[in-house]
Each structure stands twice: as C-alpha cells, then as structure tokens.
Image: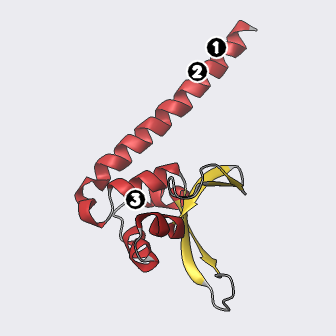
Amino acid sequence: MTHLIPPGDSPEVEIIDGVAVTTSLAIAQYFNKPHDSILAEIEFLDISPLLREPNFRESQYTPEGQVYSFPIYYLNKDGFFLFLLFGASCRGYAQVAQAYIIAFDYADESSKKSVTQLQFLNH
C-alpha cells in the first residue's frame, strides 16, 4: 500500500493492486460522519451494476484491538466521484453520471487504441 495524499488534506487515497482507492472509513473520517451513514449511502446509490461492480468493492476490516470484523467499501476514482455527486440526496442524477463515466471511459479506450494503431502503422 502506498499512501498518495497526506491524511487530513483529503480522504486517504492508497494504491492497492496497482489501483488508487479510498475507503468508506476514510471518507467517514474526513467528513466527520458515522461510518454506518457512509455505508448506507454507498449501498443505496442508484447506479447500474456495470458501474457498481468495478468501482465499489465490499470487504471487511478489523479495527486494532478488536475481535470482530466490520464492513468497509473500497472505492476507486469513479466510485468516489459517484459517491460524492450522487449520494442519497441526488439519486435522480445517477443515470446522467453513469452515462458520462461510460462515455469518458469509452473515449479513453478508443484514443488508446487509435494511438496504438497509429504507432503500428508508422513502423
């Protein structure tokens, strides 16, 4: 795990398996909200499984000195922004966010393929 941003400046972001992620617990701490509240907001996001599965990973954590495990979510960049923008108070706009994220991802992938094809043609 590599910490990219110092705690306190923004929610903690770390690299896990080559992906930048934050956690529901880090978000709760940053916004000074109960973790249960953040978990509920994530669980009730009105988003497609096509965006939920790659952007939100449910797991368990055991706090230091505790015996019991508790739920936690790992969120990548898109998941974090979906959470911030379309939490419980703005569910109606989730469809728009999904469309834009999918469009941006498609554009990024298409541009990478175009560059690869151009590089191939130039050799």
Q: Quadrant of residue 104?
A: top left
Q: Label 2 neighbourhood size at 10 Å, few (<14), some (14-19), many (20+)?
A: few
Residue type at the position of mark 1: Leu
Q: CA distance from mark 2 to mark 3?
A: 32 Å
Q: Which residue is mark 2?
A: 114
Viewer-nearest residue: 58 or 116: 58
Which residue is rendered at x = 46% and y = 69% of the image?
28
Q: Quadrant of residue 44?
A: bottom left
Residue 9 position (above or below residue 56) = above
Figure colour scheme: secondary structure
In the picture, the disc for residue 104 is none
Disc 2, disc 1: CB below 8 Å?
yes
Which residue is rendered at x = 65% and y = 50% of the image?
19
Q: Which residue is mark 3?
A: 83
Q: CA distance from mark 2 to mark 1?
A: 6 Å
Residue type at the position of mark 2: Ser
Which SS class for mark 1? helix
Q: Which residue is mark 1?
A: 118
Which SS class for mark 2? helix
Residue 44 position (above or below residue 90) = below
